[in-house]
Image: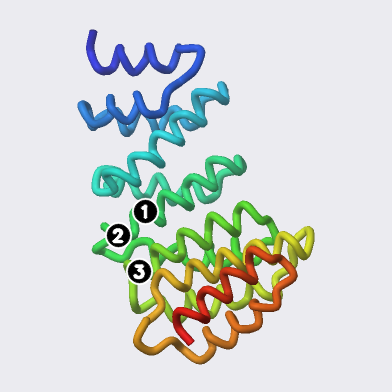
Amino acid sequence: MSQEERFQAELEAKKVDAESMVSLILTDLNLIDRVLQELSNKVPRVKFACSKSLLLLSERCPDLLYTRIEKVFELLESGNQILKWNAIAMLGNLAAVDRNRRIRRVLRKFYQFLSGGELITANNTISALAKIGCAFPEEQGRITSRLFGIEHAVFDTDECRNIAIGKSILAMEMFVNPVKVRKEVLEFVRRQTENKRKATANKAKAFMRKYE
């Protein structure tokens, strides 16, 4: 049985296994294009398993998926939230191998996601921006300023906003200069030590103990 036939059999299984799909991709890189095509499959279990397999590939072998980064960019416009969330996460993973700085082209779109008021989209974007900040030091200032804006963003509930604030604190901690933390960062995090969400307040307190 060829790798293509194995891949087709996987798609037709009652439960499509993303891990198995990654293994198949690694033995036949041409299957990456096939997986991308299947993202438009009308069968949800197929579509989402393919999306998850690409996400796993971006985590483990980002160089392989980077050659199709334009296709990942297109997914940011998907009307399907899961495909969009996974694309955001993929781009965060691909930043580490983005020597041509192509991801910078979609940062404006990422900033829109931050202020869109949708918690899962915002949280996925915050996590991706943390990785992008690590990969592109020249973008850290702008990313940090955008993360500050979460404090005043409009979400469905105050609790949602507070969750996103906690996520932002962890994101900034990933690329903050440990020798000299910006005053604005300390001021932002210090305010969150009084956050009504205990988990977020604890994140802020831990950050201040470490860097103040």
Task: Residue at 50% x, 80% y: name it.
Answer: 209
Q: Quadrant of residue 42?
A: top right
Estimate the x, y position of residue 155 in percent, counting from the top left: 74, 62
Foreground pick, 174 / 98? 174
Left or right: where 120 falls relative to 109 = right
Q: Do the residues labelled 3 and 2 touch (CB within 8 Å)?
A: yes
Q: Of all residues shown, which one is farthest toward the top?
A: 1
Count of marks placed on residues: 3
Label 3, on which residue?
A: 134
Q: Do the residues labelled 1 and 2 touch (CB within 8 Å)?
A: yes
- Quadrant of the snapshot with the N terminus: top left
Q: Alpha carbon of mark 1 to alpha carbon of mark 2: how far?
A: 6 Å
Mark toward the start of the polypeptide (1 vs 3): 1
Foreground pick, 90 / 171? 171
Estimate the x, y position of residue 50 in percent, counting from the top left: 44, 30
Task: Residue at 51% x, 76% y: name it.
Answer: 207
Seen in the picture, residue 46 relative to 164 is either above or below; the reply is above
Residue type at mark 2: give it: Ala
Residue type at mark 3: give it: Cys
Q: Quadrant of residue 44?
A: top right
Label 1, on which residue?
A: 93
Q: How is the image coloured?
A: rainbow
Label 2, on which residue?
A: 96
